[in-house]
Structure formats: C-alpha cells, structure tokens
Image: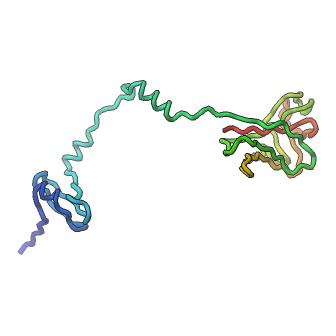
Amino acid sequence: MTRILQIRRGTAAQNDNFTGLAGEITMDTTNKTVRLHDGETLGGIALARADEVEAAREIETFDINSVPASFWQTLFDTYQSSDIQSKSTDPVSIGNNVQYFDDYFSDLDTLPLFARATLVCQSDDAGYVAGDETSAFGIGDYAMPLIYTYIGDYILHVRMFSGGQTFWVPHKTTGVKTNLTTSKWKVVFTVYY
C-alpha cells in the first residue's frame, strides 16, 4: 500500500498564531503556500510561490535622468570631503652626517592624510637656482625617501631617515642623477590634513 505524507495545515490566521518546531513545515491553505518554522518565530516564515517570484522579477525601467537635481545636491553636500589644509615646517639644513630629519607640529593632534618632503635650493646647484623647490629627490640608492608621521608627547612628528647617505636630485635640465652640495639645499616637510 502507498504511504502518504501529510503536513500540518491551516488557514493564514491559524498559521499566524502557531510556532512550529525548528525545521517543521506547515501549509497555509488561505494563501496556498508553505511556512518554514524555526521554533521561535510566531507564524513561521512564509515561502514564496513560483508565480509570486516571477511577478517580483518584473522591474520597470529606471531612467537616471528622472532623478531630481535636489537629490544629487543633497548627496554631494552630505558626502563631499572637507577642504584639505596644509602646514609646512621651516626649512631644515641638510648635514653630511645627519641620520634622520625630525620636525614637528605642536598645533596638530591628529595624523595627517599624507605628508611629503621637498628640497628647497638655497643657492645654484644641479641646474636649480635659489628658491627652486623639488619633491623629486633621493638619498643614497633610494629615490623618493619614505616620510612618516607619528604622535608623541601630544605633538605630530614628521620624520625622514637619511642614514648619513648622500642626497641627490635629477639635474633640472638633463634629468641625470646629480649629488647635492648639502649646504646649498634645505628640506621642508608639509602635512596635509
């Protein structure tokens, strides 16, 4: 003889007031669907029928041009980044035996978005004239030395290591790596926050 499995069934109202065991399935005879129970949720979780899923897939075409300008303005006003500010140190002399350069900002108590170092020419050297500033330089075998920041004693420190190696720049007109005369250059740190 054939065996038939029959699950609990009831109207939508009856199902709404029933908390089935975890993993139990009941039939909603009003909506012609089934509900899955987790042992906690009153009424269980109604599962969608295939015809309900197909109807939900029919999405009307969206035209981006129909969005009012006020929506975009509100979005920009809410999420635009604030103005970026910057501060620079006074020029620091480059010595032949200096292992690192350290300067600080006592009025900043937060890490900056980024920091950079530039060299400022004090008197003619490597094709540059006094007042020229360049961020393209190297120390020893390394181009574009790493600048890092940290907060210590409530002061923002900006530091660059040189290891006592020679500073160099690409010659202003030829681009050839040219060692600097350290007395003719100073380094300036700038932080952007």
From this viewpoint, is residue 85 visible? yes
- What is the x, y in percent for residue 154? 72, 49
Q: Quadrant of the N terminus?
A: bottom left
User: Which residue extends farthest bottom?
Assistant: 1
Residue at 72 percent across and 40 percent down: it is 107
Residue 150 in view of the camera: no
Q: Nearer the viewer, residue 149 or 64?
A: 149
Q: The C terminus is located in which quarter?
A: top right
The reply, left or right, for residue 63 in relation to residue 15 is right
| Position of residue 1 in the picture relative to residue 161 (left or right) | left
Q: Tell which of 55 and 114 is nearer to you.
A: 114
Residue 74 in which image quadrant: top left
Viewed as shown, does residue 65 lie left or right of 156?
left
Q: Whole-percent x and y of residue 163?
A: 86, 52
Q: How many numbered callouts? A: 0
Identify the image quadrant of residue 123: top right
User: Can you give x and y, in whole percent of width and height, for residue 105 in the image?
Assistant: 75, 42
Name the colour scheme.
rainbow
Q: Position of residue 161 (x, y in %)?
A: 82, 50
Q: Which residue is pictured at 31% across the width and 32% down the height?
A: 61
